[in-house]
Image (cartoon, helix red, strand yellow):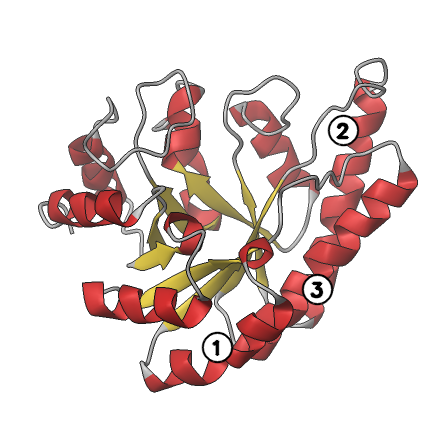
Amino acid sequence: MYLSSLAYPNTEIIEFINRAHELGFNGVEIIVEGFSENEIENAKEVIEELDLRVSLHAPFSDINIASLNSGIRNESLRQIKRSIDLADYLSADSVTLHSGRISPLSMRFKEKAWELNINSLRTLARYAKKRDIKLCLENSSNYYGLFCCRIDEVREVLESVENLHFTLDVGHANTCNSVFEFLEFIERTINIHLHDNNGKNDEHLAVGEGNINFEKFFRELRKREYRGIITVETLNDTDVVKSLEILKKYL
């Protein structure tokens, strides 16, 4: 099981990694925009000393790979490619990224934005394959303008883009009323993000504090013999500890 750095926004990366090890996680998921590139590169020695696995989450703040503004789109691609390079340096398992989204202009040109989204994902998947990195699309939460909340959009992407894998965000799926439907993609799933909510907002609560049926979810995972990464992705250390206590019943 992996721990996301999302819960440690004001923590130096070495402290975060040590905390993950202290809590008994066997891997960490580093959100690239939370630390400088030098910090991430310098963490390699500690990660290896503690015998931890690592995955990366590409930047998502102000990033839009579906932007009709070519400058914004190209910079978004550059930053995600840099995350793939960092993953290669750290011998990471995978890189997770978010889909593009509709911007004010593309509200009038949704089909064009969707086409750019697909093309950008193809570009990034090819880039990752050359570096032997598994690139994973994460399903989005139910906010207006975000692509890939709906299962049909995720299906179209995975059918259209070669060498692209999937990160199932269970909390995001719950806001779209489709937690179990997304298990359709279990054979392409490399990573699963765990957090809870009450089905309306992307709250990133501790596991067990919302309305997601995790007992049923893990039962379904066992049926499908899932052997990929499971990542706790809450907002603070207290909720990480709470989640661990609940997850002991299922893992």
| The disc label shown at residue 82, or none | 3
Which residue is at a point 41% across and 60% down the rendered structure image? Answer: 11
| The disc label shown at residue 43, or none | 1
Which residue is at a point 45% across and 85% down the rendered structure image? Answer: 45
| The disc label shown at residue 87, or none | none
Residue 137 versus residue 197 in the image, above or below:
below
Q: Which residue is mark 2?
A: 114
Which circle, 1 or 2, is nearer the viewer? Answer: 1
SS for callout 1: loop
Quadrant housing residue 145: top right
Which residue is at a point 55% across and 72% down the rendered structure image? Answer: 39
Identify the image quadrant of the N terminus: bottom left
Q: Is residue 201 visible?
A: yes
Specify the farthest residue to the right: 70
Q: Position of residue 87 (x, y in %)?
A: 58, 69
Residue 88 versus residue 246 in the image, above or below:
below
Q: Do the residues bearing badges 1 and 2 touch, measured as CB atoms within 8 Å?
A: no
Q: Amino acid at mark 2?
A: Trp
